[in-house]
Amino acid sequence: MQLKTILRYTFFFICFIVCRQVTQAQNQPVGKYQIKGIIADSLDKKPVEFVTVNLLDVSTTKSAGATYTNDKGFFELGLNKKGDYKLELILVGYHPKTISVTIDDQAPVINIPLIVLTSNVQQLADVVVVGTRQLVEQKSGMLVYHAERDVTNLGGTAADVLRKTPVLKVDADGNVSMRGSSNLKILINGKYSGQMARSPADALNMIPADMIKSVEVITSPSSRYDAEGAAGVINIITKKGTDSLNGALEIVASNWEQAFNPRLAFSKGKWNVNFFAHAHRLQQKRETNLLRSSFTDNGEPYQLQQQAFMNNVMPHGMSEISVDYQADSSTLISLSATGWLGNWPSDRRQNNTTLQSGAVVQQFEQQTITNNAANQGYFLSLGYSKKFRRVGQELFVIALYEDNLKDDFDYDTWHRNTEGVILYREQNNNHMRSKESTLQIDYTHPISKDGKNQLEIGAKAILRDVSSDYTTLASADNQPSVLVPVSSRTNVFDYGQDIFAGYVQTKFNLPNKWFLQVGVRLEETLIEGRFKTQFQPFKNNFRNFVPSATLTKTLNEANSFNLRYTQRISRPSIIDLNPNIDARDSRNLESGNPDLRPEASHQVELSHTLSTEAGFFFNTSLYGKQTNNSIENIIQVNSEGVSLSTKQNLASNHQYGVNLSTSFSLTKGIVLESNARLGYMDFKSQALNIERKGWGGGINVNTTFKLRNNYTLQAFGDYDSQAVTLQGHETDWFYYSFALKKEWPKSKITAGLSTVNPFSNTMSRSRVIVASGFTSDNVTRYYNRAVKLTLVWKFGGQGKQVNRKSASNDDLKSSSER
């Protein structure tokens, strides 16, 4: 029997075991004795659901069982031992309540007709209570940035929000990294989209900042998460409304972009519908200057000088509709559909000058490159979650399907001399389509009567199929205007990747405020690649055993320590594997590598969190990470001065560092938030004879001033120091912005005026490479001075978050460049 078949049977066997456990749990006997009751609000006498009902045995002071109320406020507990008990009733927003009951043979069933809970919200005459809500919060296993509480995110995109998020770094191109590595997974409501695998920067531009509720930064993911994502996981939570009708209309206009973002939420009875859309016209303008020195075969110095100018307009948009059906207080069915389309061209004009010894010009040419990068697709999600009678017992099932209908990347490049005569022309048309199906089952089972200690098990299957049909046409000999097919660069690449996974994880709340979480995940990956011509088909099957552990000590309400260990892997994407050569720039080629293997990393992290009721937050995190067989972008230059960039497994790296995050009020109305990072990178490659190490870091400061008459002023600055890379380094970078916001609460209208880099027309950053046989310095100037006006009109209620779960296909190493 084939391994793939065995794994599929194993996956369905795990699913059967989970369903069998759930069935047994639903049909378990309620016990010889029973306690029943109804809980209501003390003021309006309406039923209160999700009240935790904990039954304590007075003789042992231990829990004898636990449950929670349904949507009618009803609860029922069964037990097999008579005696004296206490009912503990707990729900956030209400004062706790304790009720004594006695069970004996004369009263085997205790029926409490009505129990009222009193709200702990006090109304005091002539007293104004001002609460401070933290922008950053430490939760179990993650840092949470509450973007909706940051009033200065108005008019931006998800990239602007992530720029302010702890631990993260966003570069000038919008690419996100964590602790020096871009190998991380970005999820939207726990779900991973192929848009993120294609280009995270482009995908983040499709999400308006006003749609984002919070950002979860998971530096050491547990076994419940996919093993992919060596640097960590980012989960962007979007807003969902549940009022009868609410929504917003946002209009953004600036010298570089224009956007329209409508949002609508509607609720009636058990149904909840959410819709949002995003239409965005983005313009990017930049210049690059490359100076590369190398040597010819006979040892003569050779130099390439390039000046390129790019000014592209990238129209794109997306929309999503989600429907939730709350069958009862414990059952939620969710359906969502997302569609997107856009074009991300990278047209450029470029001058290429080659010089040899004595600075003698050997060749000069003008190059024009036009590019079409059309992309469109859709994503479907169907989820089912069920809470059972026992506290902490839950089942979650989700099915996902994604179809990237079109992911084209076509270019046409013309080479001319100073007189405009055509020297060479080339066309490359790459039409790619990908399909992905996912089925995931998670089950949580309480292993203590109060539900605080839990066992989690789950299974997951991801089936991917990708096809890349690429054709290259180039100038015929002595006829530069005539294009003929290039058979060596024309092919059809079909790629399949199936992943079957299962995990087991336990959570223990130990005495003296200790918490322990231990888990292990097993993933089997089946990869198969086929080419129509030239290349041989390949298969690559591998198994990963991924452990994780977390130990937490809570000193008091304000202080806690966390020690975490996790192992992570990174699988290459099809873009990194596809051998199609991108020769838009004939002097700087890019190609995928079909022989690329996954990388593995081990990480240990120790953190301390101080969080006070006054709103002061301070998080310190020390970490160390070792990555073996790491996937690195390697640039090599041949004797003709042409470079080839490919991803290869030719290095390892060690990282050590510290992250600091804080948020607090300086005075009334002034809030300061800051994130700092300092890390040491140590790259080694025996194959390339490279060892490079050095320190790098950065700091950002976000200061908010709340003024009179509903005005808010904000100043933000982000500095990144020089960063070490395997073959060189990147120079430092500084980004800053100012914003002013005005609110009209009665009409629910908000206006914002912001500016980026107001004191200079451009910002620059250099990428320096010092490698065997060549050196290069590539300077990019970004035209990013901007003035932006944003208008938002909100209608209806404020909305509340629907508590839904979702799957997270965070298992592919994304490629930030094409």
Image (cartoon, helix red, strand yellow):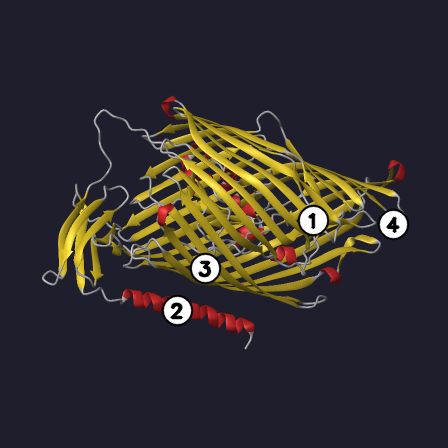
**What's the distance in space between the residues labelled 4 and 1, CA to CA?**
28 Å
Mark positioned earlier in the residue sequence (3 or 4): 4
Query: What label does residue 400 carry, if any?
Result: 3
Q: Nearer the viewer, mark 3 or mark 4?
A: 4
Residue most extreme to the top: 708
Q: Position of residue 296 (x, y in %)?
A: 86, 47
Amino acid type of disc 1? Answer: Lys
Find numbered disc 3 in the image and state the secondary structure of the residue it sits on: strand
Mark positioned earlier in the residue sequence (3 or 1): 3
Mark positioned earlier in the residue sequence (2 or 3): 2
* Residue located beneath label 4 in the image: 297
**What's the distance in space between the residues labelled 2 and 3, CA to CA?**
22 Å
Task: Count neighbours of disc 2 (C-alpha within 10 A) and say few if under 14, some if 14 to 19, many if 20 or more.
Answer: few
Q: Is residue 326 above or below residue 362?
A: below
Q: Nearer the viewer, mark 3 or mark 1?
A: 1
Residue most extreme to the left: 106
Contact between labelled residues 1 and 4, with CB atoms less than 8 Å apart: no
Query: What label does residue 669 carry, if any?
Result: none
Task: Count neighbours of disc 4 (C-alpha within 10 A) and say few if under 14, some if 14 to 19, many if 20 or more.
Answer: few
Query: What label does residue 684 carry, if any?
Result: 1
Contact between labelled residues 2 and 1, with CB atoms less than 8 Å apart: no
Q: Nearer the viewer, mark 4 or mark 1?
A: 1
Residue most extreme to the front: 59
Amino acid type of disc 4? Answer: Asp
Q: Nearer the viewer, mark 2 or mark 4?
A: 2
Amino acid type of disc 3? Answer: Leu
State the residue in front, 478 or 386.
Answer: 386
Q: Nearer the viewer, mark 2 or mark 3?
A: 2
State the residue in front, 737 or 223.
Answer: 223
* Residue located beneath label 2 in the image: 17
Q: Quadrant of residue 678?
A: top right
**What's the distance in space between the residues labelled 1 and 2, CA to CA?**
46 Å
